[in-house]
Image: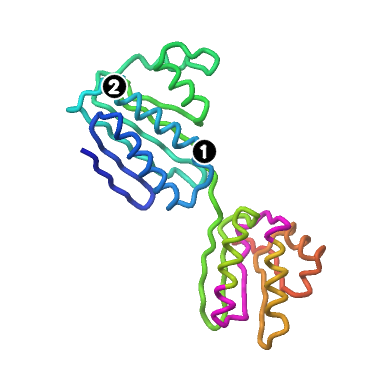
């Protein structure tokens, strides 16, 4: 038995106490995290795998009649909660606090040593059969795109660096090939750019600046990025305005 429910910010799994189900659960978790535009998810996957293994082996003792419940949900932009519950009798959770990477102890404590090292916080219910772990994450910048009034409005939701430069390059090229020559960037949530991403703005300027009716604008731009565009003289190609107080 294996069921999955996916909501906007949560993945809910329920399955029987077969260790083979862990791999399937991890596959579903990776797909969910990818849909959330997360990067560097190995720690979250490893923590979840350890929690599921403990629930099956030590909580339910591999009893196929007992079920494991797992919910992974977003707390905020940089933190996720993993809750795993088994149908066992629970255990003395005070033992877990003593588990460290240097003191592996029993097999159960080795798993929790890994969990302790990779989480921000671990909580248990009173019985000891429900554990909640909080894991910090990294999020890949997304680009919200609107085309209206003959222009392209791009709103990045984070920093523009080499990690997302190819995605931005493809997005802008597609709009250029579709005939757009007016590009407006809302930079309210961008605090950092690197040379790789900056080169995309250089190329875009070369593509459109000799064509009639073109517009290139950066709005809500931080002082650091304004200085970067001045240093590279891109301010001669782009109209740049600073951040609004309500941005």
Could you say which quadrant of the image residue 154 lies in?
bottom right
Q: In the image, what residue occupies the spot 65% across and 54% down? A: 162
At label 2, counting other C-alpha atoms closer than 10 Å, the crowd grade (few under 14, some 14-19, many 20 or more) is many
- Per the image, label 1 sits on a secondary structure element best described as strand
Q: In the image, what residue occupies the spot 38% across and 17% down? A: 93
Q: In the image, what residue occupies the spot 69% across and 85% down? A: 211
Residue at image mark 2: 59
Instruction: Give how far apart the Cα atoms at labels 1 and 2 are.
Output: 26 Å
Tell me if residue 187 is in the magenta stretch.
Answer: yes
Residue reaching furthest to the front: 20
Residue at image mark 1: 136
Closer to the camera, 97 or 55? 55
Rendering coords of residue 213 (x, y %): 66, 87
Q: Which residues are magenta?
A: 174-197
Rendering coords of residue 7 (x, y %): 33, 51
Vertical arrangement, residue 175 with respect to residue 47, above or below: below
Could you say which quadrant of the image residue 229 lies in?
bottom right
Vertical arrangement, residue 197 with respect to residue 46, above or below: below
Could you say which quadrant of the image residue 83 lies in?
top left
- Per the image, label 2 sits on a secondary structure element best described as helix
Tell me if residue 214 is in the magenta stretch.
Answer: no
In-image side of 247 versus 17 (left or right)? right
């Amino acid at each position: 038995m294996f069921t999955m429910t996916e909501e906007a910010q949560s993945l809910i799994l329920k399955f029987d106490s077969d260790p083979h189900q862990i791999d399937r659960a991890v596959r579903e978790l990776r797909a969910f995290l990818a849909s959330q535009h997360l990067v560097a998810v190995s720690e979250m996957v490893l923590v979840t795998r350890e929690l599921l293994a403990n629930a099956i082996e030590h909580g339910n003792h591999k009893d196929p009649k007992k079920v494991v419940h797992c919910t992974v949900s977003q707390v905020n932009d940089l933190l996720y909660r993993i809750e795993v519950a088994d149908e066992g009798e629970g255990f003395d959770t005070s033992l877990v606090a003593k588990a460290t990477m240097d003191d592996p102890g029993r097999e159960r404590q080795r798993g929790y040593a890994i969990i302790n090292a990779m989480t921000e916080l671990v909580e248990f219910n009173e019985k000891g059969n429900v554990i909640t772990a909080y894991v910090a994450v990294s999020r890949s910048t997304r680009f919200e795109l609107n085309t209206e009034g003959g222009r392209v409005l791009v709103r990045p939701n984070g920093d523009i660096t080499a990690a997302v430069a190819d995605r931005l390059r493809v997005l802008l090229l597609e709009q250029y090939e579709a005939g757009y020559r007016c590009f407006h960037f809302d930079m309210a949530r961008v605090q950092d750019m690197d040379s790789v991403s900056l080169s995309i703005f250089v190329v875009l300027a070369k593509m459109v600046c000799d064509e009639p009716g073109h517009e290139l604008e950066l709005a809500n731009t931080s002082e650091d990025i304004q200085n970067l565009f001045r240093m590279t003289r891109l301010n001669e190609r782009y109209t740049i305005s600073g951040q609004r107080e309500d941005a």
